[in-house]
Image (cartoon, grey):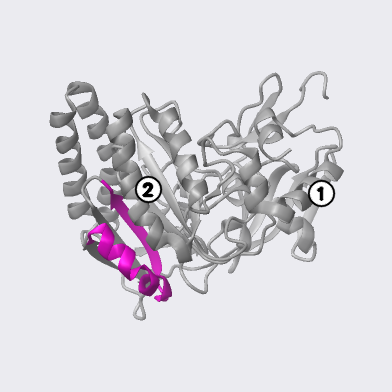
């Protein structure tokens, strides 16, 4: 009823977008989190409502020794949100690295109120709904592939950024999952390489819970407290850097050197923070072939911005490999593999100016915005990097939603 529930209509899960993507000013928000039932589990598939959180799904599947095919870095997300936008994963070769790629079918309510089932036979529409950002209909039920739990061995190496930039071509050629923790002000990075275990080692639960608590909860809280307690940068910043580096050394190293998708998505601490909370974040994707050059430039950019504006990200920057993926019209890695750079901070003052300058830096280095996880990008730049795919998405979206029932102000401004 458009009178009772005015446009724009925005389905919202964990409400974790880094920008205004989830806002529905003057419109209607659909809170999907109560639609969280697991409807059916078979030997190789899962049917679940769109509002179920990844952590809840992981725990239920693990009881039967099963897991999702994709590990999302942020376990607090709803599965509907995860298939409709970018998945922050480790980029294992020969495996899907977007949760939407493992979809068998989904049930959707269209903008005109029809209930529609989309299957793998409807390839064009499946490719539309992956990375659709809630603009093409309300995803209600999803059936995905699952598998027996696969354990991975994690090897961690510490490098200075110039060393990492020099070996990036070799790193990208390794057939292993890749995740990096970058500290530009210490000129250091910890690189995690992950590969499946041939003997399927048992994974210890407690070390992973401690590691996740330290990285996702304790570190932001301590850093936030130090920022409030010390106003003098020469005292505050070395304390923060020393603490975060020590935390990385202890918990990102060999503290927990075996993992699985089931394990990493089971923790309650691995959540995307609300932008109004104690941690803010922003992501940009860069073509993998250029990332060695991006690393050195990113350090210089960080130092220069700090000198000129007094702001810096006080949490380590993370980087994830995303493999070449053409399963969705708006896939950031449609043209080739990318590295997603995720900057985070507990400092709100100066953040907006930083993300504006970061957007200029990213555009200069062929950066690709993630439409709900990137701040301060322009409509002109989106049109440039997504090109004909964005026009095709817009045309199909307009046919499904001719009255713009689900087009909020943010997406109207940025993709039309």
How far is disc 2 from disc 1 in space, using C-alphas? 38 Å
Q: Position of residue 415 (x, y in %)?
A: 69, 40
Rendered view: 175 above or below 187 = below
Q: Position of residue 405 (x, y in %)?
A: 79, 32
| Residue 132 visible in the picture | yes
Q: Is residue 168 magenta?
A: yes
Q: Residue at x 73, y 58 (%)?
A: 126
Q: Residue at x 31, y 53 (%)?
A: 181
Depth order, front residue of 393/57: 393
Numbered range of the magenta stretch: 159-184
Rendered view: 65 above or below 388 = below
Q: Is residue 333 magenta?
A: no
Q: Secondary structure at mark 2?
A: loop
Q: Is residue 180 left or right of residue 106?
A: left
Instruction: State which quarter of the image contains the C terminus.
Output: top right
| Residue 203 visible in the picture | no
Q: Residue at x 40, y 27 (%)?
A: 277
Q: Residues within 10 Å of mark 2 (few under 14, many from 20)?
A: many
Q: Secondary structure at mark 1?
A: helix
Residue position for label 2: 267
Hey, which quadrant is residue 110 in on the image? top right
User: Mark 1 or mark 2, which is nearer the start of the sequence?
Assistant: 2
Q: Position of residue 287 (x, y in %)?
A: 50, 60
Q: Which mark is residue 149?
A: none
Residue position for label 1: 396
Residue at the far bottom in the pictured view? 198
Q: Residues within 10 Å of mark 1 (few under 14, many from 20)?
A: some
């Amino acid at each position: 009823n458009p009178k009772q529930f005015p446009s724009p209509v925005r389905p919202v899960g964990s409400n974790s977008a880094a920008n205004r993507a989830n806002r529905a000013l003057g419109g209607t928000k659909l809170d999907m989190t109560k639609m969280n039932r697991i409807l059916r589990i078979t030997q190789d598939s899962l049917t679940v409502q769109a509002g179920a959180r990844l952590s809840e799904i992981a725990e239920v599947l693990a009881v039967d020794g099963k897991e999702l095919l994709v590990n999302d870095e942020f376990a607090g997300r709803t599965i509907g949100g995860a298939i409709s936008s970018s998945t922050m994963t480790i980029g294992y070769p020969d495996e899907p690295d977007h949760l939407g790629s493992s979809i068998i079918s989904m049930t959707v309510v269209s903008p005109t109120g029809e209930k529609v089932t989309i299957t793998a036979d409807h390839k064009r529409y499946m490719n539309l709904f992956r990375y659709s950002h809630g603009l093409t209909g309300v995803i209600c039920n999803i059936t995905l592939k699952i598998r027996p739990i696969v354990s991975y061995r994690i090897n961690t190496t510490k490098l200075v950024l110039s060393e990492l930039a020099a070996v990036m071509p070799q790193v990208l050629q390794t057939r292993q999952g890749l995740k990096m923790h970058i500290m530009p002000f210490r000129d250091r990075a910890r690189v995690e390489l992950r590969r499946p275990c041939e003997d399927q080692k048992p994974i210890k639960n407690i070390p992973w819970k401690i590691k996740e608590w330290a990285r996702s909860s304790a570190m932001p809280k301590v850093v936030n407290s130090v920022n409030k307690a010390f106003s003098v940068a020469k005292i505050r910043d070395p304390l923060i850097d020393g603490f975060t580096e020590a935390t990385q050394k202890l918990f990102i190293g060999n503290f927990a050197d075996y993992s699985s998708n089931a394990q990493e998505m089971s923790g309650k601490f691995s959540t995307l923070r609300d932008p109004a909370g104690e941690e803010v974040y922003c992501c940009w994707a860069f073509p993998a072939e250029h990332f060695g050059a991006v690393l050195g430039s990113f350090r210089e950019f960080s130092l220069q911005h700090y000198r000129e504006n007094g702001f810096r990200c006080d949490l380590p920057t993370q980087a994830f490999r995303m493999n070449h993926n053409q399963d969705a019209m708006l896939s950031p890695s449609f043209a080739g593999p990318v590295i997603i750079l995720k900057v985070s901070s507990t400092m709100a003052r100066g953040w907006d100016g930083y993300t504006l300058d970061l957007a200029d830096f990213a555009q200069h280095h062929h950066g690709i915005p993630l439409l709900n996880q990137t701040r301060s990008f322009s409509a002109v730049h989106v049109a440039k990097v997504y090109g004909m795919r964005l026009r095709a998405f817009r045309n199909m979206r307009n046919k499904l939603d001719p009255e713009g029932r689900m087009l909020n102000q943010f997406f109207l401004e940025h993709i039309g």
